[in-house]
Image: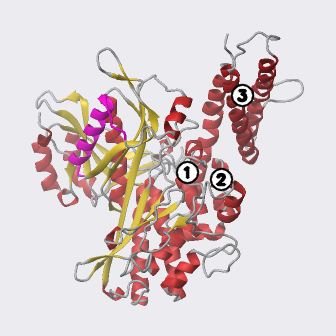
């Protein structure tokens, strides 16, 4: 079977009865259809509808609605309830549809893999769109209209003097994601100490892949090409250890971090492509006997996985030319146009209400710690001078520039991870960018004044940015600032899901920027928060605490009491912490019990503080037990 004989992509211009019927007749291996809706947590629906039923009811599916689903079974709390759960799926005919092939199921008649046609869809409940895809679509349309109106009102914009803004016919939303992930042999784990040492010595970054890891990486890149994603690179990341070879020449004890990048796309298509890429990577590596984790921080103390997300703004002119709205005419003299400065300022000023959309899980916040190249400060780096692009990897929002290519100018948001809901993230990014763009253009300030605003020092008044904050640093924010200095200059990062979700209440003026255009409706934000907090407390009680329990009870005494005063002292301290974490007594409850009681009583502020206390004590006991084990020689 040749791969070229299979159907991978159905383009928007083919989403009509005539073309679809012809394609499906040519490819009888496509046996099922799945309408793909995305809930507020980023989960995609996946049902199997026989292709014969799709063909029979094609006009209804294309022009009216797809199947109905039970909204109470997806993450839409407070919207689709048990007594009002019906959700209709509406076909999106303006993006690519993909065929997902099952490499373990072959069609008897054709000998080809059985395929499922995945159709991106919107979800409607009570005649209202209630899904992540529709939020992104509505957000982009709102930003498009507002920017066009802004350009017509201000036909001469600083940094865009080389074009007539009144001649802009449309706005183009260029965006892209990068996918990092861990891959390992099933049921095999490398010691954290070995992973940490390898990372510190940079033994893995850009190293050559071998064995089934190499095969899987190459096959994944080939598959992305077949689906038209135009992969640009696959390589090893900073995390991992060198695998081993068994007697038959197969790789074992694999524990490596990889990254795959593909070409940028536009708006909704970017988010759809990211979802497809994760599916492809997971399946290809699984077929090679390897497990893939898209968790942000699958291994404590070792580099986590990000999914850096690039956002840009371009204009289609009335003559058909595409112009980057963020680039000034001379990239050696200025960093950005007024629109570029506004976009960066909007993201940074309002990031506290974007962060909940980006980091909505325990796992995601575990990644955002200092020392692992993960962004923890709301700050950007532009570069020392415009003719030397920034290479600062410690900041949240990176300015990506190529002084020889004005179309390359964009903002790289470094906080998303592979499980970030890309649809909501992109919607939030562009809405808050618009807030800053409006402020900068309507201020009438030139490029030097806008650069000064973004570069202002703490205590200086700004026309848009907050007085007691700084937003730009060309320094290493980890090494050149203490934690107290970072918190003072750039704000205190949230440490738990509860703290992060509270931003919507804590920063009403920033929430207003996110809710412009009535895209992120209050009911949507409330539903998102409720779902995130439900997952947070459920995981804390039913997964994290049991995992801690299992780890702690394995910390056993390894020496005879009285044989070593040093060992006795260490063990007494370990035992004391173990009991404070897990053992109730007549003197009081242990931390684990206090957390469970706080959750039951819905005292989430207390739950959050106790979670942080438990995590700190876990870090302490791990260090102590490691020292204790190293001192045992008999």
Q: Main secondary structure of the magenta part?
A: helix
Q: Tell me: 483 left or right of 409.
A: right
Of pointers 2 and 3, the one earlier in the residue sequence: 2
At mark 3, the secondary structure is: helix
Residue neighbourhood size for the residue with mark 1, other residues' Cα within 10 Å, grouped as few (<14), some (14–19), many (≥20): many
Disc 1 and disc 2 in contact, CB within 8 angstroms: yes
- Residue 5 point in image, percent of width and height: 11, 41
Disc 1 from disc 3: Cα separation: 31 Å
| Residue shown at the point (35%, 57%) measured from the top left | 270
Q: Quadrant of the C terminus?
A: top right
Question: Label 2: which residue?
Answer: 494
Q: Is residue 359 above or below residue 203?
A: below
Q: Nearer the viewer, residue 124 or 478?
A: 478
Mark in the foreground, 1 or 3: 3
Q: Quadrant of residue 207?
A: top left
Mark in the foreground, 2 or 3: 3
Does the magenta portion include 223? yes
- Residue 75 point in image, percent of width and height: 51, 46
Question: Label 1: which residue?
Answer: 359
Q: Give me the disc on residue 344.
A: none
Q: Nearer the viewer, residue 489 or 97?
A: 489
At mark 1, the secondary structure is: loop
- Residue 514 point in image, percent of width and height: 54, 67
Q: Quadrant of residue 185?
A: top left
Question: Label 3: which residue?
Answer: 624
Q: Nearer the viewer, residue 231 or 5?
A: 231
Q: What segment carries the magenta color?
A: 207-228
Disc 1 from disc 2: Cα separation: 10 Å
């Amino acid at each position: 079977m040749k791969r070229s004989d299979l159907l991978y992509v159905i383009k928007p211009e083919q989403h009509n009865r005539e073309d679809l019927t012809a394609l499906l007749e040519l490819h009888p291996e496509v046996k099922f259809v799945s309408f793909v809706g995305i809930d507020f947590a980023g989960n995609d629906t996946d049902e199997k509808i026989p292709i014969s039923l799709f063909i029979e009811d094609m006009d209804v599916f294309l022009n009216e609605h797809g199947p109905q689903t039970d909204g109470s079974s997806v993450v839409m709390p407070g919207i689709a309830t048990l007594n009002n759960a019906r959700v209709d799926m509406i076909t999106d005919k303006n993006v690519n549809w993909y065929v997902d092939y099952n490499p373990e199921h072959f069609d008897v008649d054709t000998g080809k893999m059985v395929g499922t046609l995945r159709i991106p869809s919107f979800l409607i409940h009570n005649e209202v769109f209630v899904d992540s895809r529709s939020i992104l679509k509505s957000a982009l349309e709102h930003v498009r209209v507002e920017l066009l109106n802004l350009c017509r009102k201000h036909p001469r914009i600083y940094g865009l003097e080389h074009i007539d803004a009144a001649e802009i016919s449309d706005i183009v939303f260029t965006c892209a994601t990068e996918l990092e992930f861990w891959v390992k042999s099933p049921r095999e784990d490398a010691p954290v100490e070995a992973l940490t040492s390898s990372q510190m010595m940079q033994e893995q970054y850009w190293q050559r892949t071998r064995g089934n890891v190499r095969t899987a990486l190459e096959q994944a890149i080939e598959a992305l090409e077949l689906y038209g994603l135009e992969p640009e690179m696959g390589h090893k990341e900073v995390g991992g250890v060198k695998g081993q070879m068994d007697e038959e020449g197969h790789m074992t004890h694999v524990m490596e971090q990889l990254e795959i990048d593909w070409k940028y796309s536009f708006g909704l298509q970017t988010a759809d492509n990211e979802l497809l890429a994760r599916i492809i990577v997971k399946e290809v590596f699984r077929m090679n006997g390897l497990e893939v984790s898209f968790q942000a921080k699958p291994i404590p103390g070792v580099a986590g996985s990000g999914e850096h997300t690039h956002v840009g703004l371009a204009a289609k002119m009335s003559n058909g030319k595409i112009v980057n709205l963020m680039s000034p005419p001379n990239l050696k003299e200025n960093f950005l146009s007024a629109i570029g400065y506004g976009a960066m300022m909007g993201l940074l000023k309002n990031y506290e209400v974007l962060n909940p959309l980006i980091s909505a899980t325990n796992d995601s916040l575990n990644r955002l710690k200092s020392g692992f190249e993960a962004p923890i400060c709301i700050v950007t780096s532009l570069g020392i001078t415009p003719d030397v692009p920034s290479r600062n990897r410690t900041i949240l929002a990176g300015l990506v520039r190529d002084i020889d290519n004005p179309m390359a100018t964009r903002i790289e948001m470094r906080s998303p991870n592979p499980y970030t809901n890309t649809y909501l993230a992109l919607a939030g990014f562009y809405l808050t960018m618009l807030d800053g763009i409006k402020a900068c253009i309507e201020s009438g300030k030139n490029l030097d004044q806008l650069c000064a605003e973004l570069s202002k020092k703490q205590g200086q008044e700004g026309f848009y940015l907050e007085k007691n904050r700084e937003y730009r640093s060309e320094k290493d924010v980890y090494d050149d600032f203490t934690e107290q200095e970072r918190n003072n200059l750039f704000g205190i990062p949230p440490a738990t899901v509860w703290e992060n979700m509270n931003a919507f209440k804590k920063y009403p003026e920033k929430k207003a920027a996110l809710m412009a255009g009535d895209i992120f409706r209050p009911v949507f934000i409330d539903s998102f928060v409720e779902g995130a907090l439900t997952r947070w407390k459920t995981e804390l009680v039913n997964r994290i605490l049991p995992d801690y329990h299992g780890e702690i009870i394995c910390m056993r005494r390894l020496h005879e009491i009285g044989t070593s005063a040093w060992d006795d002292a260490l063990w007494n301290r370990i035992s004391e912490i173990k009991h404070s974490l897990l053992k109730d007594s007549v003197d009081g409850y242990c931390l684990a019990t206090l957390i469970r009681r706080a959750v039951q009583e819905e005292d989430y502020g207390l739950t959050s503080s106790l979670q942080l206390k438990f995590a700190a004590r876990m870090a302490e006991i791990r260090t102590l037990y490691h020292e204790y084990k190293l001192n045992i020689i008999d």
